[in-house]
Amino acid sequence: MTALIMKDLYAIKGQMKSAIYLLLFFMVLAFFFDMGPIVVMFAVLFGSLQVMTSFAFDEMSKWDKYGLTLPVSRRKIIASKYVLSLLLTIGSAVSLTPIILLFNLFFRSFSTDELFSMLCVISAAALLMLSVSIPIFLKFGTQKGRFFLFAVIFIPVFFTSFISENVARFSISLPSVQTLKLLAYGAPFFMLLPLMLSYLLSIKIYANKEF
């Protein structure tokens, strides 16, 4: 499995270089325009999205047809994608920790607790997005999969935005700040269940796929 993960890392190496340059650009904007949360969101989501790039490379080079001739099971090929997604998401979150602490030294618009809460929520959102997108890309391919993914993501985002803007109108009572913080810190762990279900679904899809 290590070789499969290394193969994907080599494939997305060029994209990661571009991501680092973009992250540096956003960091400069953050320091001048107080945009810390934007940097957090960009870095975590962009890092996790590189798994999608690896699918595009595999599809373009028809790697699956070759990979299945190797002494490696279909289950391991799928597992490598999920391990890679976890590594990229966790790696993005960990690498952002010193940036968050540094940002907090210069600006006090957000407390360290709030920034770390955002980091946890965005990491959870990235894991949920991966849980949905990997089976979709396996089933429909990267070209068609993007349209399905957009629809799947847009609907809950629109619904959440609508509810948040109409909390007062519907007289919805929100949990306490302490409860929201606990939920935020636990969010990445809650997303491990959808990720596991997604993994099992992906194995089933890939097992029935012809190349």
Image (spheres, helix red, strand yellow):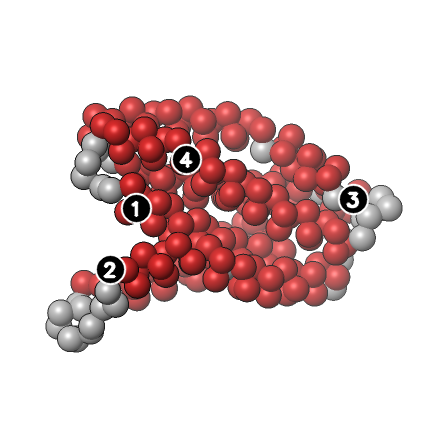
| In this view, the mark in front (1 or 3) | 1
* Label 1 element class: helix
Report the residue at 54% width, 49% height from top: 143
Count the numbered circles shown. Answer: 4
Q: CA distance from mark 2 to mark 3?
A: 49 Å
* Label 3 element class: helix
- Is the N terminus in the top left, top right, bottom left or bottom right quadrant? top right
Q: CA distance from mark 3 to mark 4?
A: 34 Å
Q: Are marks 4 and 1 in contact (CB under 8 Å)?
A: no
**Residue matched to label 1:** 113
* Label 4 element class: helix
**Residue matched to label 3:** 67
- What's the residue type where badge 4 is placed? Leu
Q: Earlier in the sequence, mark 2 or mark 1?
A: 1
Give 29 or 119, whichever is nearer the viewer: 119
Residue 147 visible in image: no
Give 36 or 210, whichever is nearer the viewer: 36
Q: Earlier in the sequence, mark 2 or mark 4?
A: 4
**Residue matched to label 2:** 177
Image location of residue 121, percent across then percent down:
38, 53
- What's the residue type where badge 1 is placed? Asp
Q: Earlier in the sequence, mark 3 or mark 4?
A: 3
Horizontally, residue 95 falls left or right of residue 7, namely left
